[in-house]
Image: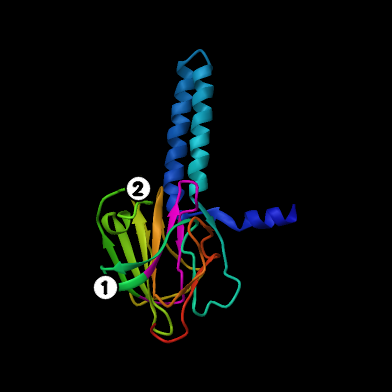
Amino acid sequence: MGKRLKKLKKIRLHHEGIHTLVAGAALLLVLNTLLYVLFPSRIPFYIFLTLSATVYLVVVNFFRCPIRIYDGDTDHLVVAPADGRVVVVEEVEENEYFHDRRIMVSIFMSLFNVHANWVPVDGTIKLVEHQDGNFHSAWLPKASIENERSTVVITTPDGTEILVRQIAGAMARRIVTYAQPGEDCFIDEHLGFIKFGSRVDLFLPTSAQVCVSLHQKTSGNETIVARLSSEQGV
């Protein structure tokens, strides 16, 4: 029981969801009250009450914001920027920033995952760029280059550049990125938030040692995605 309470204390609601949850609660309260008053039969009221409560709890679950602190040495380490499932692990040509071969690791977040995004490496923010685009399903390969997205490039202390790309999905309509160029950033910090179904791509040097596999579940700020070469600037 003590461990369960301790775990619950480390979970809170993300501030990005406060307005949505308050407005949603008010709307559902009004609708349920009208059904209760207008229908003599209580069956429609109880059906709608059950459905609305279920939907609201799903949304509350979506806006969970676990407090996670990585316990260990973070040198040359890349941690998962998001909760979800690995849908891509492959070497690709990255043509928007690096224009060379990179290892791409993509994590898909379902509606039931935490959608807060974490900084994957210690370093300095070099670039933050938002690009408008389509809203294909986030698990599709073309989503990485065609969907609305936010690109963040981080330079690690040894000069290695890591690209993190937040990608909107078919349901997602808002990407929030907290990173600002020139700022120092660290593992354990939030990078941003994506609302309602999405994905995060990592582009790593080809020398990186990937530590996750296809279809593996990840936990943001906890799962080790890769270890970087200790050779500077690789």
The single residue placed furthest to the bottom in the displayed view is: 232
Give residue 24's position: percent from left, percent from top: 44, 39
Magenta stretch in the rendered image: 103-125
Q: Is residue 41 left or right of residue 157?
A: right
Residue 180 can be seen, yes or no:
no
Give residue 50's position: percent from left, percent from top: 53, 29
Give residue 30's position: percent from left, percent from top: 44, 30
Residue at 58% across, 55% down: 11
Residue at 61% across, 58% down: 10
Q: Please tell me whether residue 29 is drawn above or below residue 134 in the rendered image.
A: above
Residue 230 can be seen, yes or no:
yes
The single residue placed furthest to the top in the displayed view is: 40
Amino acid type of the residue tagged 1 in the rendering: His
Q: Please tell me whether residue 108 is drawn above or below residue 211 in the rendered image.
A: above
Q: Is residue 119 magenta?
A: yes
Q: Secondary structure at mark 1?
A: loop
Q: Is residue 51 magenta?
A: no
Q: Residues within 10 Å of mark 1 (few under 14, many from 20)?
A: few
User: Nearer the N terminus, badge 1 or badge 2?
Assistant: 1
Label at residue 153: none
Q: Secondary structure at mark 2?
A: loop
Label at residue 137: 2
